[in-house]
Amino acid sequence: MSQTSSAWPPSPPLVAILRGLQPQRAAEVGRVLFDAGFRTLEVPLNRPGALECIATLVVMAPADACIGAGTVTEPAQVDAVAQAGGRLIVSPHCDPTVIARARALGLYAVPGVFTASEAFAALRAGANALKIFPAEAMTPAGLQALSTVLPPGTPLWPVGGITPESLALWRRHGASGFGIGGALFKPETPLAAVSEQAQAFVRAW
């Protein structure tokens, strides 16, 4: 399938961060997440086999899903993700060259930011949403303070330490989406546990 039909922002705006996903498990993990209601899957590039996993997920993804990569740190990696069929480019930092390359290819750019300076630089470069990272180091009150100086409606997605129980508090303070990693998936996590946690996050949203 082509992902050009992918909706933005995703619904629900919950990004499954599949760090360490192995190509041989990509299809089964993807199916469990899609069945639970997730529509945005991110495979970080700093583990072997990430591009192969992305290509597998793209082929099997529902029409309203958005598949992409995390830990994208160089423009050349954006090209590789696009060639694999990915549409989402997530970075741990704010690099205008990465954002610009993603937008030039028609991809969604979500850079990591923590300060107001980084947030405005990312928005000027064309970011579609802002990844608040590491969220463990910012309180919900801090996110609310940041949101008051940004353009209204700026999508803010805390990433790091997010649990089903913490979603409501973050949302009350301005979060409009989330990136969810270890609380949802680790390479050794049994498939049944991934399913259970995915459903818990969707219910919490």
Image: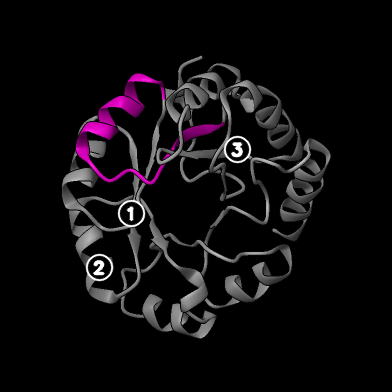
- Disc 2 versus disc 3: distance between alpha carbons? 27 Å
The earlier-in-sequence mark between 2 and 1 is 1
Q: Quadrant of the C terminus?
A: bottom right
Residue 38 counted in the magenta span? no
Q: What residue lies at 54% left-to-right and 78% top-to-bottom? A: 173
Residue 77 counted in the magenta span? yes
Tell me if 198 is positioned left or right of 65 in this view. right
**Marking on residue 39:** 3
Q: Amino acid at mark 1?
A: Pro
Structural crowding at the residue carrying mark 2, measured as other residues with C-alpha within 10 Å and reported as few (<14), some (14–19) or many (≥20): some
Q: Which residue is mark 2?
A: 118
Mark 2–mark 3 CB contact (< 8 Å): no
Tell me the SS state at disc 2.
Answer: helix
**Residue 92 position by quadrant:** bottom left
Q: Which residues are magenta?
A: 65-85
Mark 2–mark 1 CB contact (< 8 Å): yes
The earlier-in-sequence mark between 3 and 1 is 3
**Residue 120 position by quadrant:** bottom left
Query: Mark 3 or mark 1: which is in front?
Result: 1
Residue closest to the eye, 74 or 176:
74
Q: Amino acid at mark 3?
A: Arg
- Disc 2 versus disc 1: distance between alpha carbons? 9 Å
Q: Which residue is mark 1?
A: 111
Which of the colour schemes (rainbow, by chain, secondary structure, one colour) is used?
Answer: one colour
Question: Percent from the top left, x then y, of residue 162?
Answer: 61, 64
The earlier-in-sequence mark between 2 and 3 is 3
Q: How many marks?
A: 3
Tell me the SS state at disc 1.
Answer: loop
Question: Percent from the top left, x then y, of residue 18?
Answer: 57, 41
